[in-house]
Image (cartoon, rainbow, N blue to C red):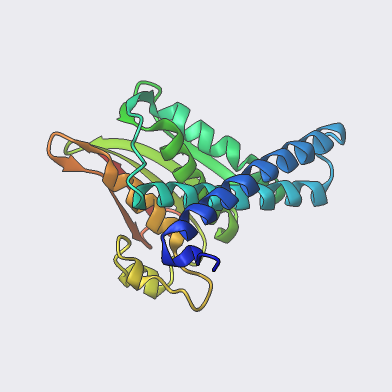
Amino acid sequence: MPTNPSSNGLFPTILASTVHDIKNSLGTLLELVRQAAARQNGQSAELGQLEFEAARINHSLMQLLVMYKIDSQKFSLDIEECAVIDIVNEAIHQQARLCGLHNIDLQVDCGDDLVCFCDNPIISNALAAVLNNALRYTRKAVLIAVAEEDGYLFITIEDDGEGYPPHFLAADLQDTTELDWVSGNTGLGLYFVSLMAGLHKNAGKSGFVRIDNESRLGGARFTLFLP
């Protein structure tokens, strides 16, 4: 009799393997789209939108793989000293197409001498996901600002949109039972960033995130705190 994959714990492994294969194929597709866009000097709005959507799916698949590894106790951070401006610039680079498509005024306030100890790719990708959300919902401007205080380095992403909905502000971002799985606007991206932040620990402190609608631009404000 055939074995039921869900009954012996194989299904999560099969699902993760399938997601990994899809991610590899999507990476190839994304590179082909970028090459096509380059041949047209970035003038095709359709190719630009296609590149953005493919990159967004790629980010979601990456998050799924990381969360699977965490659940399977196969994940560990690769902590190193990083220039914060490099992390910010990488996040911006990943979202440059969307910024250009919507003609968003993207402002950065980050000292060149600021450093932190973190998993650079994980934090860059996490910030890129939050920046993606800000660029989608802002009206015309986004601000990324970095500072240090009370043993934390914190990175804020602010916009001039309508702000986070009330159910986001009231939810515990570290509790998946409070995510809205019905509407489709789950907040899973914020949960992922919160999870990654919490894995960063130093001198008895743990990273965390905070969201509110106190942006200096008048909309939503996301803040990542790293110890």
Q: At 60% from the left edge and 54% from the top edge, which residue is drawn? A: 140
Q: Nearer the viewer, residue 126 or 168?
A: 126
Residue 155, located in which quarter of the rendered image? Answer: top left
Residue 84 sits in quarter = top left
Say above or below: 164 vs 72. below
- Expressed as whole percent of the image width and height from the top left, the position of residue 211 reads 35, 58
Reply above or below: 6 against 51.
Answer: below
Q: Nearer the viewer, residue 86 or 30?
A: 30
At 35% across and 48% down in the image, what residue appears? 70
- Residue 193 in view, yes or no: yes
Q: With 2 as the anchor, is 205 left or right in this view?
A: left
Instruction: Point out the residue furthest to the front here.
Output: 1
Compared with 63, 211 (above or below) is below
Looking at the image, residue 41 sits to the left or right of residue 172; the answer is right
| Drawn side of residue 19 relative to residue 191, left or right | right
Where does the N terminus fall, quadrant-wise?
A: bottom right
Q: Position of residue 147 (x, y in %)?
A: 31, 36
Quadrant assignment for the C terminus: top left
Relative image position of residue 192 (x, y in whole percent): 40, 53
Q: Residue at x 41, y 31 (%)?
A: 120
Residue 196 vertical position relative to residue 221 in the rendered view, above or below: above
Can residue 141 be seen here? no
In the figure, is residue 33 to the left or right of 192? Answer: right
In this orientation, which residue lies closer to the viewer: 19 or 84?
Answer: 19
| Number of numbered discs overlaid on the protein picture | 0
Q: Position of residue 157 (x, y in %)?
A: 43, 48
| Residue at 34% from the left image edge and 24% from the top image edge | 80
